Image (cartoon, rainbow, N blue to C red):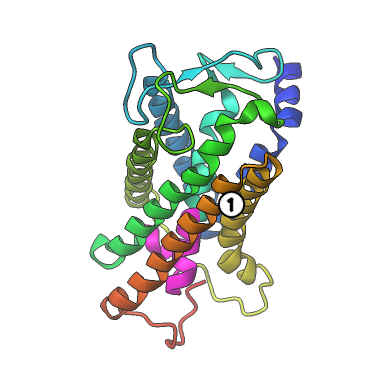
Amino acid sequence: MILLFLKTLLFRWYVFFFLFLGFGFLLRQVGTLGASARFALSFILSYFCEWSSSLPMGWFPFGHYTYLPTTHDREVWIGHLPFMDFLSFSFLMVASLGVVVRVWGLSIREALSWPVRLVWPVLFLADLLFFGIDMVIDPVALRGNRWFLGQIYYYPDGGSYFGVPLANFLGWAVLGAMILFSWRIVSFVIPIHKLPIQKSDHWLEVDRWGPTFLWFSVFLFNLGIALYLGELFLFLSDLIVITVLLSIVFFTKNVFWRRFPLRSSDKVDRS
């Protein structure tokens, strides 16, 4: 089992690299216990959703698809799911939330602790980017037999978006909402305390830009794979989708900005 886990680390190094970054960025915002609890909840929710959708008659929330045990000897599987598959949702939510709060001049800490009436647009937009990044990831993952991911699943009934059914993307939005809701609930059990202002702390810029870097790294990674595979239409579609979604994030900031009690001009450290 240990040897197989080491094989998994080597085989899926990119997943664990992004997972490490995502956990580190969240830890800086909510503390070790808060980050651990939120990642654990996202793992549980993600596994349940993946498991229920990939059962022989499953459909919730991603629609029906089937995993192929082609990598059983190369990586850890839990039940009929590859271990790495349900890990990505956690760091992708950190990244999506990080992009929105960076644009809005807030922090992940505030998005998870302020009253919902103040931050609901931020949470909604985070879920939108979470949904959007899958529109980049899933078509590429479906073509895993043409790159080092491997062919690990397929949609028996096909799909209208480069082979992926639209139900899958809606499922990501549903799971994203579940994750954000659970992360907000954790704030009541494990309070998020404001970090002391440390102007000399060189990690402050990492706090501000780290999750955004993570989101764009995942985007560019998958965009590069699409280009490598020669999927020009998928490449262009990815660019269009992400441009539209990011435009929505910037536009809604201007619409809702006045509803927030703190502005970027306030002399308050909200990193």
Q: Is residue 144 above or below residue 94?
A: above
Relative placement, left or right, of 52 versus 40 is left
Q: Is residue 264 above or below residue 160?
A: below
Q: Quadrant of residue 245?
A: bottom left
Residue at point 47% right, 32% down? 163
Q: Toward the viewer: 194 or 145?
A: 145
* Image label count: 1
Residue 104 in the magenta stretch? The answer is yes
Q: Label 1's element?
A: helix
Which residue bears the numbered disc 1?
219
Q: Residues within 10 Å of mark 1 (few under 14, many from 20)?
A: many
Residue type beneath disc 1: Phe
Q: Residue furthest left?
A: 117
Relative placement, left or right, of 99 versus 116 is right
Q: Toward the viewer: 4 or 124?
A: 124
Residue at point 62% right, 49% down? 223
Q: What are the residue bounds of the magenta stretch?
A: 96-112
Quadrant occupied by the N terminus: top right
Q: Would you say residue 36 is visible in this rendering? A: no
Residue at point 42% right, 21% down? 51
Q: Is residue 76 above or below residue 188?
A: above
Q: Position of residue 184 (x, y in %)?
A: 34, 51
Residue 39 in the magenta stretch? The answer is no
Q: Position of residue 239 (x, y in %)?
A: 54, 57
Q: Would you say residue 197 is visible in this rendering? A: yes
Residue at point 70% right, 25% down? 8
Q: Magenta stretch: dominant SS?
A: helix
Q: Position of residue 175 (x, y in %)?
A: 36, 39
Q: Position of residue 190 (x, y in %)?
A: 40, 49
Relative placement, left or right, of 232 versus 250 is right
